Image (cartoon, rainbow, N blue to C red):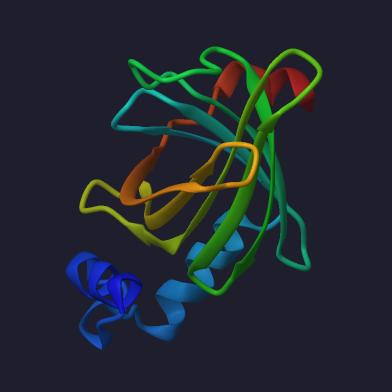
Amino acid sequence: MKFLAVLIALGLASPAVAMPANEQGRLHDRLIGSTTTWVNSYGSVMTLDVAANGAVRGYIVNNAPGTGCRGIPYDIRGRLKGEVLAFHVSWRNGVADCQSETEWRGVVRLTAAGKLEFVSHCHHRQGLLGDKVSIGVDRFIEQAPNRLQSFVDH
């Protein structure tokens, strides 16, 4: 019930924010087969690669003040279906183990400035048994692609 309340508050469950089919298609085409970089309000940075089948891979670097495992990349695994993006991060790698996991699920949509934003519900479990749970919202904004890197890659 709390999950639904958060989604409604975000406008994620409301049909009023649904995009026309042509907008969804453009958005989907913009993400499929591309690598994008996003930053959230806490300064965390994620890079996503979206395959033709919607599989999402990438990494996230936590930069949130007052949290552990900062400045280290962690793998992202997830899926994009239409405008809905969902992914999971286990905050464990060969460098650090924060004994926690986070899941994000939300929608990707265009901002008035023409950038993509990902507005999501996030569910964080911490502790060896995942006994500490926190639920919140998060918003990532797509960053402009590095034109020089794109030129070098081609």
Which is more toward the observer, 46 or 132? 132
Which of 149/139 is in front? 139
Identify the residue at horizontal 78%, vertical 68% (top origin).
53
Residue 117 drawn at (x, y percent): 36, 50
User: Which residue corresponds to the image point at 21% horizontal and 84% vertical from the top-left?
Assistant: 16
90 in relation to 81, above or below: above
Which quadrant of the rendered structure holds the N terminus? bottom left
Residue at image coords 60%, 54%:
87
Question: How many numbered marks have been drawn onto this rendered protein structure?
Answer: 0
The picture places residue 17, in percent across and down from the top left corner, at 25, 77
Q: Nearer the viewer, residue 151 or 47?
A: 47
109 versus 36 height, above or below: below
Q: Position of residue 74 (x, y in %)?
A: 67, 29
Q: Which residue: 62% across, 50% down?
A: 88
Q: Is residue 14 left or right of residue 63?
A: left
Query: What x and y, as percent, mark residue 52?
Result: 77, 63
Drawn side of residue 116 relative to residue 58, left or right: left
* Left or right of residue 109: residue 9: left
Q: Determine the image quadrant of residue 41.
A: top left
Q: Quadrant of residue 36?
A: top right
Quarter of the image where the C terminus is located: top right
Residue sitting nearer the eye, 91 or 40: 91
